[in-house]
Image: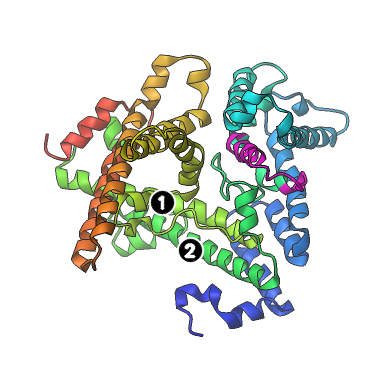
Amino acid sequence: MSVKLSQWHENERLLLWVQRVPGRLALWAVASALLLWHGSNLTMLAALSAVMLHPAGRRLYLSFAAVGMLTSRFLELPDLPLSIAAPWPWLPVVLAAAAGTCLLYLAYILAQRYSSWPTVVQRHPVLAVHAGAWLAMSVSTLPWFGALSLVTYFTWRFSYLAASASRGKLAGTRFRDHLFYLMPVYGGTTTPYGKGLDFLSRHEATDAAAMARSQLAGIKLLLLAAVWIYALELLDMVIFGATAKLLAGWPTAWMGGWTLGWPRLKALVALGAYPAWPIGWATAYLELIRATLVLAVMGHVIVGCLRLLGFNVFRNTYKPLLAESVLEFWNRYYYYFKELLVDFFFYPSYLRLRGLSPAARMFAAVFAAAFLGNMYHHLLIQPEHLIHFDLARLWASWSPRLVYCFLLALGIWVSMLRQQKLRAAGGAVRYVVRLRRIAGVWTFFAIIQIWNVKHAGVSIGDCTAFFLSLFGV
């Protein structure tokens, strides 16, 4: 059976070889080298080694690794009594491990007792999780409550746990079945890569062949992440004049030290600098490419680790710059964030709005996810202004993103309507038409990215003024 070079991880001979002892050793060595190059922690390397030696104990080993990760998180909190010097140097470590594990065990026990919750909580389990999260964040600045500042990292993971409980999916599961994704050794952000146990279980390797396929796919992603890291540095050096880190400056040395030296989009917007429109457009497009590369690198490393551990889940970023519609780009750009918004905002809104017409129902569900859910997620991970009720700073910090989220939601909805018409029309699509569609998608996301600039002091007016400058206004 012939396999494309890009699909070498599906090669049957290679799959058979890595299931034998020499192949497994080689796979472990390559995976470990790549993880070290990408800066993975020793806990991840130890977990990988244990899983490769005994795949059947995967969840147990990942649970031990989760306790180690929790311990380091708790020890990093500066205002906890755990950080006070003690006569026994090991005591803070033990207390941190116990405190972190007890916190997650409490969440697990509460989820297991879903049927005994008050009726209003049973009807809205995810809302209950988020109400508890905001309460915890509001008291996290008090003495002895500093650990609650970690709640933002766990909120969406607890949400998946609560959703599983509401569907009756926790029966027969143990604490370790949930601990490993609540505090993942493979890293991650406030957005859970791999979602919850339901999703991970569907993609978990159950035999040697599936494990080999998953691990080869993981190595492929780690290699691809390395390629994108070099591409990102090349872009930063040649276009933006950044200092070399990995490439030792050879591209600019080859060009006699010359670079374009263009400022980043955030600098142009923040300074109110409006270059000639060709430069402005080029900067906007390059910012989109750069943002895609940065996200792809992070996602490839995390998903690559997941696959090495035997969870052959989807990529987080998969060729979004080749998307031919806004909807397709959104599906491909940040898959797990999109899934979070769909799971907790789109579907609940769509199911509860049965009285509306199909078009209005879809419009409301899209805006609930891409606009309201998007804004809420980012307020959740940076809640300081809202907790302190500093409305002036809240508006100054988040008002540009309101425009970004609104334009994104509007673009997705229009794209959905257009895709329905195109599917109804059918027929082959010419190459030129496909290129025109891709260019249109690039243009849309390059434009709305202007209002997603992460720079202190940037206002809606600054972003809008730069946008108008692209048209000579």
Mark 1 vs 2: CB contact within 8 A: no
Q: In the image, what residue type sits under mark 2?
A: Leu
Which residues fall within the magenta stretch?
Answer: 155-177
Task: Name the residue carrying label 2.
Answer: 224
Q: Nearer the viewer's eye, disc 1 or disc 2?
A: 1
Secondary structure beneath disc 1?
Answer: helix
Q: Residue 89, position in %: x, y?
A: 84, 35
Using the image as rendered, state which of residue 369 and residue 66 is in the foreground: 369
The kind of secondary structure the magenta stretch mainly shows is helix
Q: Residue at x 60, y 70 (%)?
A: 213
For this view, does 408 lie left or right of residue 23?
Answer: left
Residue 164: quarter of image: top right
Q: Is residue 131 visible?
A: yes
Task: Decide: is 4 above or below 77.
Answer: below
Q: Residue at x 46, y 37 (%)?
A: 351
Task: Decide: is 159 above or below 323.
Answer: above
Residue furthest toward the right?
87
Task: Decide: is 50 above or below 440.
Answer: below
Q: How many marks?
A: 2
For this view, does 367 lie left or right of residue 465?
Answer: right
Q: How is the image coloured?
A: rainbow
Q: In the image, what residue type sits under mark 1?
A: Asn
Magenta-drawn stretch contains 270: no
Using the image as rendered, state which of residue 110 and residue 287 is in the foreground: 110
Task: Decide: is 234 above or below 284.
Answer: below
Residue 331's disc number: 1
